[in-house]
Amino acid sequence: MKTAVGRRKRLPHLFLLAAVATNLAGAAKTLDVYDIDVEGGKSVLIVSPSGESMLIDAGWPGYNGRDSDRIVAAAKSAGLKQIDYLVISHYDIDHLGDVPLLVSKFPVKHIVDHGPMEASGKTPSDQYKAYAAVRDRMDHIVVKAGDSIPLKGVDVLVVTAARKHIEGPLKGGGGPNPLCATTPEVPERPSDVEDNMSIGLLFTLGKFRMLDLADLESAYDYKLMCPNNPIGSVDVYQVSIHGQDKGVSPVLAQALQARVALMGNGPRKGGAPQTWTTLRGASGMEDIWQVHYSIAGGKENNPPDDYIANLDGADGTHWIKLSAASSGTFSVTNGRNAFSKTYR
């Protein structure tokens, strides 16, 4: 009898602990994004609230497997056992990386790309051939604009792919873009056709939205955003083409009205001064976070040190981490010093 009474007395406490655990589990279900330091290449790791993962691009090949090691370190830090979707946005070497080496170090379930390299008019490189040999043995998904990638727990819409873009407006988009009339149109650069094959993705989790157009250049910003803005506003803009001027047009970068820009630049690649001016001139822009200090930018065209993962000088290989909730609140954290800011 005494034992039974004791059990009854403890039940309210057990219910309270269960409720707290449930609330904590719910609070932990965020969309987590890691901008990995691949020295001016591109590699962004996404972990959805369901626990499924996506890696956008694999950085550079060579350097004794440097970038694949950094990707694996980020994946393990995120608690992953595999990468569910590896998206190769396009086949430039600083995005394609060394996929055979990466998959030998960490399991990959599906590979997503825009189709064969020949479609861009380029002759397949040896690096691409090695990638294709691995891809063709795996589950391979070719996407086009308007498709969705079935990453559980978050909506992932393909906005651009293989020089095509979504035609109709999305919810909240479709309004005239006045920046088209005030910004000179830039002609397409035929020497960089692979850039404009880029798979561009819009991530939506409840009220939170993030846009990543990989290496889409300014000429294609116009094709997407003029005369009307089909996307509307976003919370976070993953700055196109490493923050190089050829890919950051006001018709996109300012029309999005993003609160935060995340830039995957290197010390000597991207982070261009004109890009900084364009981003700072965007309505609603609160902060720019950079993977590296931009040497070309100098103090005037770089954010404060707390917003830079890797400062001028010795490279610490740190990433920037974003965590977003479906309420629209998100935080950004500097992997170098754990400085964090929340945007409500």
Image (cartoon, rainbow, N blue to C red):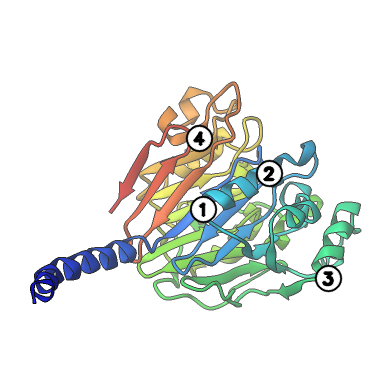
- Marks 1/3: CA–CA distance: 28 Å
Instruction: Please tell me whether residue 53 is drawn above or below residue 299 in the rendered image.
Output: below
Of pointers 2 and 3, the one earlier in the residue sequence: 2
Q: Which residue is mark 3?
A: 136
> Horizontal and vertical percent for residue 193?
77, 57
Q: Is 62 left, or right, of 36 in this rendering?
A: right
Q: Which residue is mark 1?
A: 78
Task: Give the residue drawn at x 8%, y 77%.
Answer: 1
Q: How many numbered marks are there?
A: 4
- Marks 2/1: CA–CA distance: 14 Å
Q: Secondary structure at mark 2?
A: helix
Residue 273 visible in the snapshot: yes
Q: Look at discs 4 and 3 and give the one toward the viewer.
A: 3
Q: Amino acid at mark 2?
A: Asp
Q: Secondary structure at mark 1?
A: loop
Q: Which residue is mark 2?
A: 69
Q: Which mark is residue 309?
A: 4
Circle 2: is it few (<14), some (14-19), or many (20+) Cα within 10 Å? some
Q: Depth check: give the residue in front, 77 or 183.
A: 77
> Horizontal and vertical percent for residue 244?
62, 42
Pointer 4 with pointer 1, Cβ within 8 A:
no
- Marks 2/3: CA–CA distance: 23 Å
Q: Depth check: give the residue in front, 328 or 106.
A: 106
Q: Is 226 left, or right, of 344 in this rendering?
A: right
Residue at the top extreme of this rendering:
313
Q: Amino acid at mark 3?
A: Asp
